[in-house]
Amino acid sequence: MSTTAVVRKNTYFDSVSLMSVSTKANGLDGVEQAFTAMGTEMNKGVLGNLGLLTDELRAAGSGDLMIVLVAEDRADTEALLAEVEDLLHRKAPASAEAGAVTYRTIAGAAEGIAGANLAVIAVNGAYAAREARKALENGLHVMLFSDNVSVEDEVALKELAHDKGLFMMGPDCGTAIINNVALCFGNKVRPGSVGIVAASGTGSQEVSVRVHALGGGISQLIGTGGRDLSEEVGGIMMTDGIRALAADPATEVIVLVSKPPAASVEKKVLAEVAAAGKPVVVYFIGGSEEAVTAAGGHFASGSLDAARQAVALAGVETAGTEEFDAAQAAADVVTRLAEGQRYVRGLFCGGTLCDETMYAVKDAGLDVWSNIQKDPAFRLTAAAGSKGHTFLDFGDDDFTNGRPHPMIDPTPRLERLVAEARDPEVAAVVMDFVLGFGSHEDPVGTTLPAIEEAQRIAREAGRHLEIVAYVLGTDLDTPSVAAQTAALEAAGVTVTRSSTETGRFAREIARKAQQA
Amino acid sequence: MSTLPEATSSAATASVAEGAELTPAAALFGGDLSVVNVGLAMFDADISAQGAKVSTLDWTPPGGGDLEAARALDVLERPDLAEKIEAANAEAVERIMAARPMLIGFGRALDVVPGMTPTTILHSGPPITWDRMNGPMKGAVTGAIVFEGLAKDLDEAAEVAASGRITFKPCHEADSVGSMAGVTSASMYVHIVKNETHGNVAYTNLSEQMAKILRMGANDQSVIDRLVWMRDVFGPMLKEAVEFTGPIDLRLLLSQALHMGDECHNRNGAGTLLLFQALAPGLLQSSFTTEQKKEVFDFVASSDYFSGPTWMAMAKAALDAANGVENSTVLTTMARNGVEFGIRVAGLPGQWFTGPAQKVVGPMFAGYKPEDSGLDIGDSAITETYGFGGFAMSAAPAIVALVGGTVAEALQYTRDMGEITTAANPNVTIPALDFQGLPTGIDVRKVIDTGILPIINTAIAHKDAGIGMIGAGITHPPAEAFTKAVTALADTLA
């Protein structure tokens, strides 16, 4: 075994590309371990832990590329290194056609590309605010995908954007649909008259997908960023978003999606609702009905309710769907459980999907533990094991810890799934699979082996493990919701049809299993 | 819009209702989405798959990821300061572009270069002491000491150099530039280039043609003999020639040479023909013998590099006009001494900001390997500081092979340099880019902001004294020099 470390000074690649290169490099014949990463402190820490940090690597800066290759004895290190470099320099095909001009800066691109009107920014959080500012200064709307942007920076950016009449979407809520083009995380939905302003990413994806499934369509989906409705940020983007949709002739109904806002901000937002001049459906997860109704808004109790009301208000004819009898379905599950199987465990990629299911179970008066629990007494860390009814958001910073979001790479959930199957107290595991742009190309396929292993472990222990899955996606997504659903059902997984239905089913199983 | 209640106070709705100009939001919803994608390549594919326009940046973190540099940049971007800097930089580039450098003569360094003494030796780059000089510069210094008769041989010359009797000084601090080692001693002939617009004068010595030459560190008898001939015949004949021809407009010739496929740093074929064409009548009228004139003609014809130093002095005369423009963040100097790379900024006159000299990457003469290379050396990066050389690669497609690229990449080099400069020089243009002017006025802030370092075309000298040129290629300044400069600017201007 031999280790080769190379530092390419002043050579920059984005982290996702580097991870993909590392992955491919690890698959090369003769490679024990390959590592391509920028020389950030974090990456050097990782190498240090692996015992691979040489002096040369230690001296690398965050603008320098590190290539570390642990090769098998018989391997030709130089040839392998050349192969890794080749992987690095295989250009992205999309806009790299011959003759295309490559810009290095936002200012350069804004000046050089006639009609450029929006910047999607997904750089390291330390640089994200600066790039967003450049975009706004150059007259571009911004979708800021990066996380780890400070609240101060967020406020400054949103105030600048507001003054210029521009959108400052994000940070840390990577969903938007502008002119029927999904940016970052988003599903392919039909164009229509429902406009969404949302502070939660998967929550807005869910509403857009349900609107589509009910026969409606989306005019615009404006992601405000997860903190927009906090006291500090004050709902700047949601306010501007509501006004823009109120003025948009193609939008007939507006839907707001968020966790409950700070009190002062809620007041501000509801004042916009009252002034919008169009029906506004308000889905504030776990929020109260009275204030919304008083402002003339339409209160939605869940994501499905929000979508149904929006579609009805838009005057779209919907085929009546058969109501899901959660109680009956849960009763059927419970009859198959062994003694002691009492708890539901939720393993989610989507934060809002986790929230909605967790709240449904909590509303039944049951105790739930989670890494996104507001009540510290019921909060779990990533390192801790599950407890009672546990609902985990794998997209939370605590779990991602520098790794890609589980919607891009669902593998971190797999281990946990198998661990839950070993727990004799577990009655059911609930999972989500998020399809669409930005997401993994086959989340179900990646998870099936772990599902099968979980089922085998339970079976060998004489238990039935109920696995419940919700696939968030449309018939237009690639892969389609139908294809992913079929693959799950073939594996004996119960597939629910909406986030709301998932919550109901989880609640009924939790209630009945705990009573049994 | 008839459903809108009177109470609506939104700016967006109001302007649409009044039929005024579209708000940015309405313009976005009503137009075609065109995305600038920064950071994650995968979004490029997603967006273009949905039929929208997308352009993904080749993005690098500001200051190459140096947070100190990014902080200094934030200071300089404070609106009050930024406004002052913008105005100062506009003034600096206006001076650079308006400068009209004229070749007004040739003369002995001792007679014309300010501060020159019989024991002064000018060298390239930022200040450096004898003990720290690299192989090629030591070779050139000892050769010059022998040439000046200050020592009988190279060994004694090394002792003289170390004795403290020689005054070493950067060319740049004597209104001069020198290619490669830049070694200029008292009796060498130099160009005299006067900026007619602003009145300042710049100097540089004469091309030795060939590869085994003093400036590349070679110093054997053949090198000394050539220097003697240049002192006794070549220099004086050029001096007489310009007395006949009168001042020669170098910016005009540079502009023509770029239209003829030179970038006037590593490719000088056209520029040399143009310069020689301008000088030839004067050379013919000079007082020298026909035999001597033939020697000079043959010597000029022996290498395209004849006009190389001339363009350096031209650039120096223009850039010096911007020195001292208060609050300006525009570079007036990039120069290397083989150990360090130094830059100087218009708003911080007299200060050098340095970092380690870099390797030069490019094709080598047969028999030499990259490990034989000396580090980046010479004042010739004054050409890039003005906006030609590596910055004008798109004007010289013939030499993209020399720098290891394609024609498309050559065009991209110039576009990239546009992102770190302040203006396009309308006086010197590039046909292949629809006659876009040279990218002019390298802005320290933009270099830090974009992470794009200036590109420099240059020659490679052997790392040891006495050998000479072994290749050519491209290099960049060290980012460190810019980090130091931007930090000093933030400290001084804030």
Image: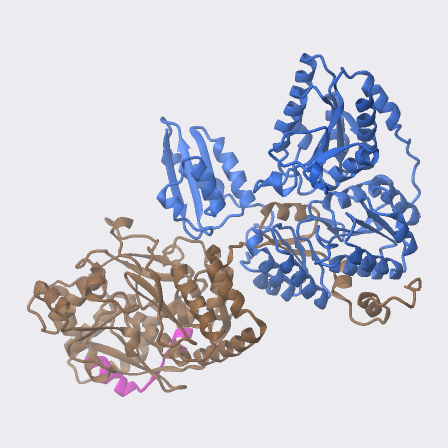
Q: Which residue is at a point 22% across and 62% down the rendered structure image? A: B132
Q: Is residue A233 left or right of residue A58?
A: right
Task: Say if the magenta span includes residue B237.
Answer: yes
Give residue A215's quadrant in the image: top right
Q: Colour of chain B?
A: brown
Question: Per the image, is A154 magenta?
Answer: no
**Corner quadrant of residue B290:** bottom left
Q: Is residue B149 left or right of residue B443?
A: left
- From the viewer's perspective, tell me whether residue A487 is left or right of residue A400: right
Q: Nearer the viewer, residue A2 or A97?
A: A2
Quadrant position of residue A463: top right
Which chain appears blue? A
Q: Quadrant of the C terminus of chain A?
A: top right
Question: From what the image shows, is residue A54 above or below residue A502?
Answer: below
Q: How many marks?
A: 0
Q: Position of residue B143 (x, y in %)?
A: 15, 66
Q: Quadrant of the N terminus of chain A?
A: top left
Q: Nearer the viewer, residue A478 or A229?
A: A229
Is residue B82 visible in this depiction of the protein?
A: yes
Q: Can you see residue A138?
A: no
Which is nearer the eye, B107 or B480? B480
- Residue A106: give x, y in percent of width and height: 59, 60
Rendered location of residue B487, percent (x, y): 44, 66
Residue at the front extreme of this rendering: A377
Q: Is residue B424 above or below residue B464?
A: below
Q: Nearer the viewer, residue B317 or B402?
A: B317
Q: Residue B235: where, in percent of width, then height?
A: 20, 78
What span is in magenta? Answer: B236-255
Left or right, A343 with reference to A2: right
